[in-house]
């Protein structure tokens, strides 16, 4: 392969005018000053300044609230959080069903995470009954994740009752009813650490 020589540079165009230059040693002339007008001639009759109308902020649409007992939650937050709560109850139910079908039921991390998330979502909404039971279940599940062992029939029963109770609580929230505390299940879970 033959290489071509580099192209010739284009010629620089010639300017048809000369740039004006000021010698560096000559100072620039000072502009002529105009006589200042007399103040009496410029004075206009004084008037009181007109009051500036006070600008009010544009009215904001009232935020729709969902009220359950003494708890008021913005509609958007309620919809998102209640959907999230239902999804996590479904994860708990699915994890429980997998345990029930296993020859030697051992708790998986996703089971504990669903209880944790359900507790967090419920805390955001302000439903202590769900928070208390979710946290007790999370701790109970954490012990089984950290120290895997096969669950017995009594443990499976308490687990099923806890998930059923959480499901009922979330369903009651979705129909705008305050969920009932289940201290009995919290106590059973705490006793079996």
Image (cartoon, rainbow, N blue to C red):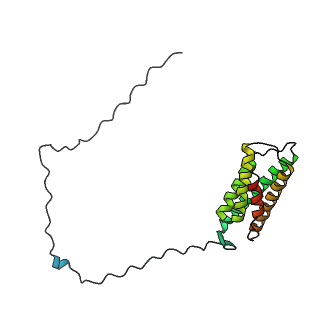
Q: Position of residue 142 (x, y in %)?
A: 72, 48
Image quadrant holding the N terminus, namely top right
Q: Position of residue 3 (x, y in %)?
A: 49, 18
Give the residue displayed 67% in from the left and 68% down from the top.
75
Q: Nearer the viewer, residue 148 or 32?
A: 148
Q: Which residues are magenta?
A: 15-29
Give the residue displayed 77% in from the left and 68% down from the top.
172
Give the residue displayed 81% in from the left and 54% down from the top.
159
109 falls in the magenta region:
no
In the picture, residue 157 is in which quadrant?
A: bottom right
Report whether 20 appears left or right of 158: left
Q: Position of residue 56 (x, y in %)?
A: 47, 76
Report whether 57 appears left or right of 18: right
18 falls in the magenta region:
yes
Give the residue displayed 82% in from the left and 44% down from the top.
150
Q: Residue furthest top?
A: 1
Report whether 73 appears left or right of 148: left
Q: Is residue 50 above or below residue 105?
A: below
Q: Position of residue 106 (x, y in %)?
A: 80, 44
Provide the major secondary structure of the magenta segment: loop
Q: Nearer the viewer, residue 80 or 33?
A: 80
Q: Residue furthest left?
A: 26
Q: Nearer the viewer, residue 7 or 186?
A: 186
Q: Residue furthest front?
A: 191
In the picture, residue 43 is in which quadrant?
A: bottom left
Q: Nearer the viewer, residue 177 or 146?
A: 146
**How many numbered tags mark residues here?**
0
């Amino acid at each position: 392969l033959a290489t071509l020589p580099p192209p010739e540079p284009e010629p620089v165009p010639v300017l048809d005018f000369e740039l004006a230059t000021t010698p560096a040693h000559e100072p620039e002339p000072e502009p002529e000053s105009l006589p200042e007008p007399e103040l009496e001639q410029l004075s206009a009759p004084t008037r009181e300044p007109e009051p500036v109308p006070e600008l009010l902020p544009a009215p904001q649409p009232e935020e729709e609230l969902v009220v359950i007992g003494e708890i008021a939650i913005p509609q958007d937050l309620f919809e998102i959080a209640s959907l999230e709560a239902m999804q996590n109850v479904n994860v708990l139910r699915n994890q429980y069903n997998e345990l029930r079908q296993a020859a030697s039921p051992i708790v998986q991390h996703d089971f504990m995470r669903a209880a944790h998330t359900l507790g967090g979502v419920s805390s955001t909404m302000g439903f202590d009954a769900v928070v208390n039971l979710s946290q007790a279940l999370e701790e109970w599940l954490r012990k089984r994740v950290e120290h895997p062992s096969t669950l017995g029939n009594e443990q499976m029963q308490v687990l099923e009752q806890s998930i059923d109770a959480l499901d009922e609580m979330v369903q009651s929230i979705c129909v705008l009813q305050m969920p009932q505390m289940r201290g009995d299940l919290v106590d059973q879970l705490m006793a079996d650490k």
